[in-house]
Amino acid sequence: MSSADIEIKKLKKVYYKDKMEIPVLAGLDLSISAGEFVALMGPSGSGKSTLLHLIGGLDTATAGSVRVGESLLETMSEAQLTSWRSRHVGFIFQMYHLVPVLTAAQNVELPLLLFKMKSSERKERVKTALTIVGLGDRMDHRPNQLSGGQEQRVAIARAIVTDPDVILADEPTGDLDAKTSEEILNLLNLLNEEFGKTILMVTHDPKAAAHAKKTVHLEKGQLEREEFSNRQPMAAAR
Amino acid sequence: MNLRLVYLHRNLTRNVRRSLLTCAAVGLPIMIYVLSMSVVHGVDKFLDNSAKQLRIVVTQKTSIVNPLPEGHRKKIEALDESKQRLTSVCGVQWIGGQRENDPTPLSVMAADADSFVSTMPEYELTQDEIDAWQKDRQAIIIGSGPAGQLGWKIGDRVSIVPTLPPYRAMEFHVISTAPKAPDNQSIFFRKDYLNEELKKDGFPEGQVSFFFVKCATKKDLDEFREKIDAAFAGSLDETRSLDEKTFMNEFIAQQFDLPKNLAILSGLTVFVAIMAAMNTMSMNFRDRIAEMATLKSLGFSGGFAFSLIQTESLLLCSLGGLVGAIVPFVVFTYTPARDFQVPLIQTLVVEWVTCMKALGIAVFIGLVAGVWPSWMAMRMHVVRALRNLE
Ligand SMILES: Nc1ncnc2c1ncn2[C@@H]1O[C@H](COP(=O)(O)OP(=O)(O)OP(=O)(O)O)[C@@H](O)[C@H]1O
Ligand SMILES: [Mg+2]
């Protein structure tokens, strides 16, 4: 069960459109310690997804530095980033992005294809991951036979099956109703508290943000303020 | 089962109708290719057979439609008095022909009665047939092709109207249907009979379309081919001598350049197949952009994306090609269609080698059709794709 801290220094991201500069992140600093659960809020277009992509090595920064655990992303090539991602990062998207023709178990098994691993061990891991998200009995269902909440659970299982250091979630409850959202957020709390995963979650919903220990606000390319929630750990609540 | 294989298989069956249409778009050209090549091979085999007969064909120098005088035969024979090297010379006059009230064209030729049998040994006439040919002035040998079509049998009295003089119905007695002859279309009767009939109506007689000159060896053939033309050089009726294979090839090409046209046809259909398969693979890729981006976000490399699409393209096209190659093979080997008659080449034989080549072409189609979409999948940027910008 691994976990890593994240340190971002003077991060800049500029997009170019028709030779026009579109500055999105303007020298942003952010530190997240290992095992922390942070919510990222901010108006639409403020650069939340952009920041998440940069931390996950899906995109490269214009300037500045991103360190995740031991890894300095700006020093890595695209191929290195790709392989690094498979070992250290778990992504969760708003639209789940499951492979529609594969079953829940096969979707979760996919990222394990990138590891040298016995088939029996893979199957074992898949089962564990699906059990953690509460879908041990839905292994052989296709995405279209699952509800939105269940699909997102499969996506979460897929994100954690490789035992990544950090989980990056971009509006994971954006497409779900209140009750289902609550279940998904509790699941993230579980991953954070029981498994010690570092989680950075983008959200527009203050109720969702309340599940995190800390919320950071992004505005005009900078972090405007940080606030800490008074949320009790799940274990304490029980 | 291996998850990669499962994924590949599911991708192929994701849109069954699209996959089937693509298979058909590849399978049909492959089938056309297999059939075309089988016809071309058949023609080649036929030509090789005529080459085996070691015959020179002598025609009028300027055009095959201009006749030569019958007297040339004596002069050709005189080039080898021993008859050891030029073993037999047979003059042939082409008169076309058709049945009364039936426009189907026939290839009827009048041949020197005395030398036909020795010049055309591949007809493998029986002794009875040879006797009948020599005794009966109105004897006619009907190739097995037209004999079958017209229902003519040995012993029938038949009537044919020549396309050339004397232009009126002539009566014949069928003495053979030449079942062994490699050329199953030609019809031969005796030239002395034609000359008599021409004389009756006052047409010039004693003309020959071409001479078949049978040689003992290949060396003799090459040597006398030149000697014959040299012998008539400067005369009123200069000649052009070719070996029979070249002659037949020219003759076929004159009517319809089969190999060339079939090659163009095959090429075009293969091109169409590539376009169709490429279109399918592009659509498949477009439909799965988000999925590909997700795979990359999970840590799958561009190379994996490339091989995923490329393999799918290869499998799809190979499958189509397999069906396209196997169907004609089975049909022309194991069903009644194996007796299907094609002019000149007789029964169509679909060879294994042709099918394997066709399969190779299908694989090539899959390779070419997959490259562009695979390349797109490989180069695709995750974030841009997730934002639906690609
Ligand atoms: N490829 C691009 N070219 C130009 N501009 C881009 C590109 N990608 C993103 N942007 C711009 O960058 C800004 C930040 O985008 P981003 O998606 O990170 O915002 P966000 O905070 O996630 O918004 P939302 O809450 O709507 O998801 C936006 O103004 C967007 O238009
Ligand atoms: Mg966003």
Image (spheres, rainbow, N blue to C red):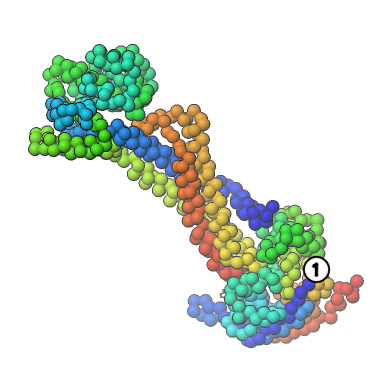
* Residue B28 as seen in the image, left or right of residue A79: left
Total number of numbered discs in the rendering: 1
Work out whether A113 lies above or below B1: below
Q: Which residue is mark 1?
A: A187
* Front one among B225 and B272: B225
Helix, strand or loop at label 1? It is: helix
* Front one among B14 and A81: A81
- Whether disc 1's CB lies below 8 Å from ligand 2 is answered no
Quarter of the rendering containing residue B226: top left
Q: Is residue B104 at all visible to an observer of this figure?
A: no
Q: Quadrant of ligand 1?
A: bottom right
Quarter of the rendering containing residue A179: bottom right
User: Which residue is found at the position 73% from the left and 80% from the top?
Assistant: A5
Work out whether B245 lies above or below B113: below
Identify the chain of the residue marked 1, using the numbered disc in the image. Answer: A
Q: What amino acid type is highlighted by mark number 1?
A: Leu
Query: Residue B94 location in percent, x, y?
Result: 23, 27
Query: Residue B345 location in percent, x, y?
Result: 37, 32
* Residue B257 as seen in the image, left or right of residue B93: right
Query: Residue B12 location in percent, x, y?
Result: 60, 51
User: Which residue is found at the position 64% from the left and 54% from the top?
Assistant: B5
